[in-house]
Image (cartoon, helix red, strand yellow):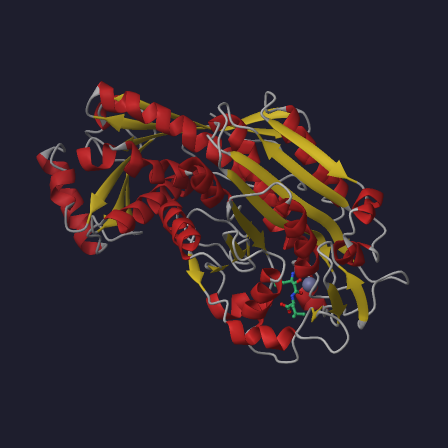
Amino acid sequence: MTKRRRKGKVLVTMIITATKGTPSTAGVELVVYLVSKDKFLPVIKDFSDHNRQTLERLAKTQEFAGEAGKAMLCSGMGGIRADHVLFIGLGEKKKEALRAALREAGGIAVQYARRLGARTVAVDVRARELALPNVLNACVQGALLANYAFDVYKKDNGKKVVLQTDFLFADGRMAQNARRMIKEEEAINAGVTVARDLVNVPAHDMTPERLAQVAQEIAKNSGGTIKAKILQRAECEKLGMGAYLAVAQGAQREPKFIHLTYVPPRNSKKVLAMVGKGVTFDSGGLSLKPADGMMTMKCDMAGAAAVLGAFTVFSDLKPAVHVHGVIAATENMPSGGAIRPGDVVKSMNGKTIEILNTDAEGRLTLADALTYVLKEKPTAIVDLATLTGACMVALGEEVAGIMSNSSVLAKTLQTVARKEGEEMWELPLFGRYAELLKSDIADIKNITSTRYGGTLTAGLFLQEFVPSATPWAHLDIAGPAFIERPVGACFQKGGTGYGVRTLVGWVMGA
Ligand code: BES
Ligand code: ZN
Ligand code: ZN
């Protein structure tokens, strides 16, 4: 069951079940059939002769042949106990393509149910190749993702209808197996939802303090598996976090440095760390952004949101390794007290940084967050950050950039991400460009003097704060974390929760 907690109310918006059964006995408003490419006839073999002929004709005129992402709706058909029958194409039955098509199909089913006002849906998964938990989970995931809506700031909020979705299996054992998988996907989606909500809430409500509260709530609800430590400005000063605090000094709102620790049930040698960029609003600081560029900058804490979302899941799925989550939360604002272009600050690891552009603030906060987490002796670190507009220019809105000092870690993350439907593409930490970050008066500067390769030089800047012996990967999620148009059937405009599924998959697989 997917629960959404809002202002104390618990709202159930989708109930997913798995049972042995057939569409004709399901007694639902909408029945969904999944159709592989050119496999329409076998799917409709149970229909009466008359209905089969009607459907074949319909498929012909609507040019529906089971292509991935295509759908065909038939309403008011006799001989089947449902108001609507929906056929959704899966395309070719190749592994990853099938998973992607199933995810999309889950989303399409939910979209149609909404449009039709159907409260009860049955999805026919009696075909054995679909019924496997590690295949079907993509479909469950898609349905859960598509069911998301953000209406906290609307007048008529909270009026949720419950959508009941039953997956129909050929035998009871398979339905039984699916139930465990559904629970797990629901747990993961709860984390994704946390991240989406955090990103969608406007910056006046999503402050560093609020992020810290959320971290504390996650710890409180974790049954003792997660601890939250919040460092105030004074403690960060004591630790020498000059880079992070330089960003924070222009803001009225207090910075909060968040450290979450998950302890596994049994001790483990593996200590994973995840660091999320938590700039709750990026105005650019004195290097002020133009109005157009600022409009979406509540999303600049999406890395932090992914980390908090992932930790929400850990208390449920109880991974076998230690996990640290670190967020240097702050606003980036211009004021009389703000850091000036040309100022030099000292970071926690001792390196001095000439800040030539106050809008390149994410790397400053991350530098100290990375240094801080090293004291936990992590066996691998992943950071997630809406770091550069250049990454959106390079890879668009649907693909994150990944840069890493470890090909093994990069490969692991990419494999998990692909399985979870979170696209990422590797970009090089091209060594020669590190020259471009040399400062005349400090150890390093926070921008280069060229317009080119901005994502790479941002990655190279971060690399200065990670020892080469520590496997580390940097995910630039500026594109996929927050989308300005719907992407596929699963994602509305706004926060996507990008990264949660990959982080959870990475930790669960470690
Ligand atoms: N938060 C922005 C990057 C960003 C842009 C995220 C668009 C999501 C959507 C980041 O802090 C930033 O302003 N980066 C600058 C760096 C530049 C000054 C070197 C950029 O990308 O322009
Ligand atoms: Zn910025
Ligand atoms: Zn930023």
Quadrant housing residue 438: bottom right
Residue at 32 percent across and 24 percent down: it is 18
Taking depth in this image into account, of 443 and 409 the one nearest to the observer is 443
Q: Position of residue 39 (x, y in %)?
A: 14, 46
Figure quadrant of residue 478: bottom right
Q: Position of residue 40 (x, y in %)?
A: 16, 45
Given residues 493 and 397, the one toward you in this image is: 397
In the rendered picture of this protein, how many numbered marks are placed on residues? 0
At horizontal 74% and vertical 66% (from top left) the residue drawn is: 353
Question: On the picture, is 205 further left or further right than 317?
Answer: right
In which quadrant of the rendered view does residue 311 lie? top right
Rendering coords of residue 1 (x, y %): 46, 25
- Asked if 464 appears above or below 501 in the picture, the reply is below
Task: Name the quadrant of the C terminus.
Answer: top left
In depth, the one of 71 and 385 nearer the eye is 385
- As displayed, is residue 107 above or below residue 168? below
Q: Please, is residue 287 above or below residue 124 in the view? A: below
Residue 9 in view, yes or no: yes
Q: Residue furthest bottom?
A: 450
Residue occupying image coordinates x 48% and y 24%: 266
